[in-house]
Amino acid sequence: MRAFLKMAAALGLAACLSTPTFAQGQGRGGFGMMGGGGGSLQLLSNKGVQKELKLSDEHVEKVEKAAQEANEKRRDRMQDLQGLEGQERMEKMQVMMREMNAEGKKTVDGILKPEQVKRLDQISLQVRGPQALLMDQELQSKLKITDDQKDKFRELGTESQSRMREIFQDAQGDQAQMREKMQSFQKETRDKAMAILTDDQKKTWKEMTGEPFDYQPQPQGRRNNNN
C-alpha cells in the first residue's frame, strides 16, 4: 500500500481522482486521496490557481513560505503515526488532516482578499469532488446530506480504495496503463457519487462550486520559485 501511495503521488493521481469536472457532472472525478495537509494553502501553491486568483508576487511569496512551513509541520506530525495501522491510523490521520487544514485556511484568509477566498473555496470544492462529500461535515450540513447518503458515500469510498489498489497491482509499474484504467474508474466513481445526491443537492453543489476551473496538478517536486 505504501508503494501504491508513493506511485500515485508521483503520477499526480491524488489530484486527478477528484477533478473539477465532477462539479459540472461531466469528465473525470472520483474519491481522491487526502492532501498533504494544509488544504486550501496547498491548493494555493498551484501556479494555475495563483493565476486564477490574480495573486501579486508578494502574495505568492507569502503563500510559498507558509506552504513550506506546513509541509515541515506535516512531516513532524506524521512521526506520531509510526507504528499505527488500520482503523486507528486512519482515524488519527483524519484528525491530523482536519487540524492542518484549519490552520492552513486561517493562514490563507489572512493573505487573500475576501473575493479571492470565495473563489479559492469554490475551486477547492471542485478539486476535492466526492471526497468533500464524504469527509466535510460542514458541507454535508449545507447540502442536508442524510445518514443514509453518508452510509452510501462511505461504501463508495471503501469500494474506490479497493479498486485503486487493484488498478495499481494490475498495472505492475506501467504508468501509462495505470492512467488509462484510472480514467475509466474516475468517471464511474463520479457517476456513482452524483447518483447519491438529490436534484436539489446537485443544484446547491453547482452553486457552491461556481464557474468550472481547469485544475492542472503540478509535478511533484516543482515549486513556483523554480528551486
Image (cartoon, rainbow, N blue to C red):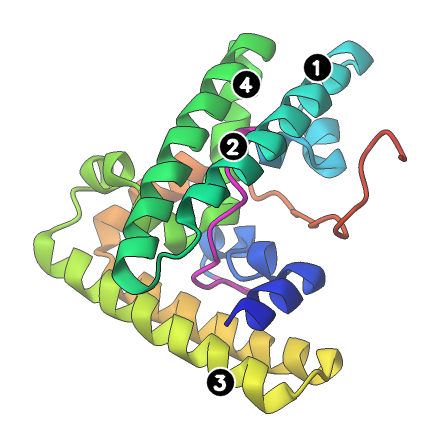
Foreground: disc 3 or disc 4: 3
Q: Give the range drawn in magenta.
A: 26-41
Q: Position of residue 177 (x, y in %)?
A: 69, 85
Q: Rate crowding at label 2 as few (under 14), some (14 to 19) or many (20 or more) other CA atoms within 10 Å.
A: many
The residue pinned by badge 2 equals 38
The residue pinned by badge 1 equals 62
Identity, as a three-letter code, of the amino acid under mark 3:
Glu
Quote the CA–CA distance across marks 2 and 1.
14 Å
Identity, as a three-letter code, of the amino acid under mark 2:
Gly
Identity, as a three-letter code, of the amino acid under mark 1:
Lys
Q: What element carries label 4?
A: helix
Q: Position of residue 22 (x, y in %)?
A: 47, 56
Q: Position of residue 45 (x, y in %)?
A: 68, 32
Mark nearer the N terminus (4 vs 1): 1
Q: Nearer the viewer, residue 90 or 107?
A: 90
Q: Rate crowding at label 1 as few (under 14), some (14 to 19) or many (20 or more) other CA atoms within 10 Å.
A: some
Identity, as a three-letter code, of the amino acid under mark 4:
Val
Q: What element carries label 2?
A: loop
Give above or below for 66 relative to 22. above
Mark nearer the N terminus (2 vs 1): 2
Is the stretch drawn in magenta largely helix, strand or loop? loop
149 left or right, relative to 86: left
Q: Nearer the viewer, residue 104 or 122?
A: 104
The residue pinned by badge 4 equals 108
79 left or right, relative to 151: right
Does the CB distance between marks 2 and 3 fall below 8 Å?
no
Q: Which residue is drawn at 67% across and 34% down?
A: 49
Quote the CA–CA distance across marks 3 and 1.
40 Å
Q: Rate crowding at label 4 as few (under 14), some (14 to 19) or many (20 or more) other CA atoms within 10 Å.
A: many
Q: Residue at x 49, y 85 (%)?
A: 166
